[in-house]
Amino acid sequence: MASITGWIRERVPLGPEQLRELTNEPVPNHLKKWWWCLGGTPAYLFVVQIVTGILLAFYYKPSPQTAYESVRYITEEASFGWFIRGLHKWAATLMVAAVVLHQMRVYFTGAYRKPRELNWLVGMCLLLLTLIVGFTGYSLVYEQLSYWGATVGANITDSVPVVGVYMKELLLGGEVYGENTLSRFFILHAAVLPVTMAALIAVHITLIRLQGVTEFHFRDEDPKKAKFFNFFPDHLLTELSIGLVLMILLSVLATVLPAEMGPKADPLSTPEVIKPEWFFYVAFRWLKLFSGTFAVLSMGLVVFLMYAWPFIDAQIRKWNPRSEASVWIGIVGALAIIALTVWEASVAH
Amino acid sequence: MNAHTPSTPHDQPDASSDDRRGFLSKVTSLGMLAGLGASYGTAAAYAGRYLYPARPRAKAWMYVARVADLGVGASLRYTTPGGEKVAIARQAQTGGPDDFVALSSTCPHLGCQVHWESQNQRFFCPCHNGAFDKSGKGISGPPGEAGQSLPRYPLKSEDGLLYIEVPVENLDVAQAPAAAREGHDPCLGGGARDEGALA
């Protein structure tokens, strides 16, 4: 045994001391509470998505003639197919929720401020990619709602002035949703976007390691108590516990509320009531309220302002260091998102 | 071990030599960067061109009806070979193709299919509540606000026969449900019509 260990150590010069050194990132005490660990939650769910996604890809066939039937086969015939599809669907839902909650936590605690502006930008990219992965994944089922959701989504790009028509054709692989579309969505969903996300997650975590986790000070904290604890094993165990709870939650959701099959896509008939996934209700309602180009450009402006917020906020604080504008803007933004989502959810049209 | 040899003034690089070396080094680096940028840029442009759809959908003129068979105010519903529904109506009687209008069922807002609501005398798009009047003009919802109308298909009349220009191949040919294909009449050249569709 010692000779095997020695053989490996010669080729991989990494011992317990170095490992401890590498993983002993000091973690602020508030991260002992799970609700401060919302950054690790989407990362864990991302791994769940990769594993279940690979399993689903064994049977999924991305063409208009075969897609729906292959999803039906996974759901109704493949052993545990319904369960794996259910895990994939619910992990996607929870991942969007966790990313949004994580971003809200970062926003309202001001953790995006200097020197962490670049990590906010990376996080914004990850938020958008999470939404796009959700959109492309839902479209792959090729049922009525997902087909028309994909059609509406692709036509949204058409509303962008000048380049919109090219973006739409590039996305659809033609002028309209056709033979090339599903394979493009599949490549994006199963390869291009996850690889990009994995790279960005690596950058996100590296920047956190380099800058350290944001420290917060609480009124009720004991000044005598240590302000930090070790990442390994303490924080890792917290994250593992959260992972186990998530697996239980996912299993319950996949079993009690399994992923179902709607009617097969009919390109000639839009259903009377059409809804996207819940996380696009905001955009869907916005598109009903305003004309296409205005709605798309205004949504683009909101996304741009979200990207630029650390720099805008820095400017505001330069003028008025005690400004609480970010809190009020955040509250108004969150309420607007909730209101538009509830509005869209509560009406048929 | 090498013996130390004192340097002579001849061996020492002078300031102008340093400048020259620095300049050449910068020019060479910039040249290499430009070369890399150009070659990888060309590769990226080729990749973009490869991903961009190679050709537009093929279109063809299809026979619809005899001009004389459609009086002013009459309408019919035409189904393209791809399955898309088209409302064709006659609005005047000058004898030219401008007498007719052929409205697409694809909403100009975000591409959903509209349907005719006879009780409200309007075309309705369920995606974002867009509505169009009988002539295809947007009257409410996002298309109404943006002043959009239902897209029109080109029409022409030759020798007393009315023709429409429509796409002849797309996903719908394979995907159209049986009901939409049942009306196919070889005599109509690939399309199918259903008179009095707007009535």
Image: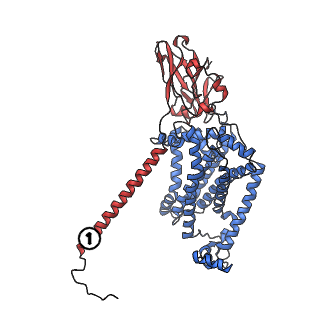
Chain colours: A blue, B red
The spot of residue B146 in percent (x, y) is 51, 34
Given the image, on which type of amino acid does mark 1 rest?
Asp
The spot of residue A57 in percent (x, y) is 65, 50
Q: Residue at x 56, y 58 (%)?
A: A123
- Tell me the subunit letter for badge 1: B
The spot of residue B59 in percent (x, y) is 49, 28
The spot of residue B20 in percent (x, y) is 25, 69
**Rendered view: B188 above or below A188:** above
What residue is pinned by disc 1? Answer: B19
Give the quadrant of the C terminus of chain A: top right
- How packed is label 1: few (under 14 Cα within 10 Å), some, or many (20 or more)? few
- The image shows a total of numbered marks equal to 1
- For this view, does A204 lie left or right of residue B16? right
Q: Quadrant of residue A211?
A: bottom right
Looking at the image, which residue sits at the far top? B68
Residue A52 or B104: which is nearer the viewer?
A52
**Rendered view: A233 above or below A311:** below
